[in-house]
Image (tube, helix red, strand yellow):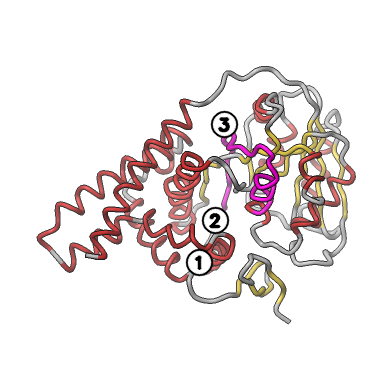
Amino acid sequence: MLLAALAAGGAVYCVMTVVAARRYLAARPTQERNTEPISILKPLAGADEGLEENLRSFFEQDYAKFEILFGVRKGDDPAVPTVLKLCEQYPDVPAQLIVTGEPPYPNAKIFSLAAMLDESQYSLVVMSDSDIRVNSRFLREIAAEFRDPNLALTTCPYRAVPGASLWSTLEAVGMNTEFLGGVLVARMLEGMKFAVGPTIAARRSALAALGGLESLKDYLAEDFVMGQRLAEKGFGVGLSWTVVEHRIGTQGFRANAAHRLRWSRSTRRSRPYGYIGQVFTNPLPIALLLVALKPAWWPVLLVIAGLRVAAAHATACRVLHDPVTIGRWWLVPLQDMASFMFWALGFFGNTIQWRGRKYYLSRDGRFEPVK
């Protein structure tokens, strides 16, 4: 009966995902032109797969006035030659490379962002990871959203683009069919009271109201906390209508598993009740377990499978226009099994591996290196 109840909850969640996706698409406003100058902050660490094309997409923006700041810990970082090459190829784009040194606290990304923010000059700021690729209209569309004077921060939905490995393809399918669904449902039920993802745009004044970016220096999920704190202070937090590409690269099983486990444990610490509720985002494994115990209940599996397909189509196809999920739809059940496994594993353990170091996660989402 417990499995039946969980399966029913999963079915309801799938329906809610479809409704949430439709409401999100229907609410897209008519964009008005905005020429507010923008500072782009790009923290870098190493030469990621596809780094040059990722960064090039920010140089090739169809926008009147913007600057790009790149932050690295050391001058000999492998990403530096790529940055210098692009700066030479696009001399008309104001760009600056900042060597920050080693961070004095756990979150190196926040340290890099804070250093770049101090050197930037515009009041509208885009913070974007190195594995993000955008189209030439990106800044124009982001700026248009900030015509709304109540908007302080917006987080961009992302379409995961995998590398050549099966494991990265499975993760991309999960991001595009499951992760975004959770964001859309939360938006529908209570509004955006958090931020997620590798690309966030914000007003400088809102970041200052947080006490500066360094107020997030001890949190692993700094993006989530950033949006959460701004929402608590009464600032407008939104989910952008601008979709970016998240180039997750080619990962083998070991690297991919470590990444997923880190994400699961981080989510559990950032929003523990929401993490428990994620059991409803994976209805297929629940339905399979139910039918394994009660074979006569096989129609339940067919219903759940149909609803899961509808939910996946609503997010991956209608919102993200994801060719990977469209072309490899048969990977969705396999990904759901993997996702359910990592969700279950996320309840155990309080340490993560990140960029070659081991960290301890505390109950409030803070983290610190293990000595």
User: Where is mark 1, residue-wise?
Assistant: 257
Q: Quadrant of the N terminus?
A: bottom left
Q: Nearer the viewer, mark 3 or mark 1?
A: 3
Give the secondary structure at mark 2.
loop
> For the residue carrying disc 1, how many other residues have a C-alpha within 10 Å: few (<14), some (14-19), or many (20+)?
some
User: Where is mark 2, residue-wise?
Assistant: 250
Whole-Å distance between the Cαs marked 3 and 2? Answer: 27 Å
Amino acid on which the number 3 mark rests in the picture: Trp
Whole-Å distance between the Cαs marked 2 and 1? Answer: 13 Å
Depicted 188 relative to depicted 147: above or below: below
Q: Where is residue 330 in the image (x, y as percent from the top left)?
A: 31, 49
Identify the residue at the far bottom of this view.
371
Q: Left or right: 341 with respect to 96?
A: left
- Which sits in the foreground, 12 or 316? 12
* N-term-proximal mark, 2 vs 1: 2
Specify start and end residues of the magenta stretch as a single range: 225-249
Q: How many labels does the image show?
A: 3
Give the secondary structure at mark 1.
helix
Circle number at residue 241:
3
Give the secondary structure at mark 3.
loop
Q: Does the magenta stretch include residue 46?
A: no
- Which sits in the foreground, 331 or 181? 181
* N-term-proximal mark, 3 vs 2: 3
Q: Which of marks 2 and 1 is in front?
A: 1
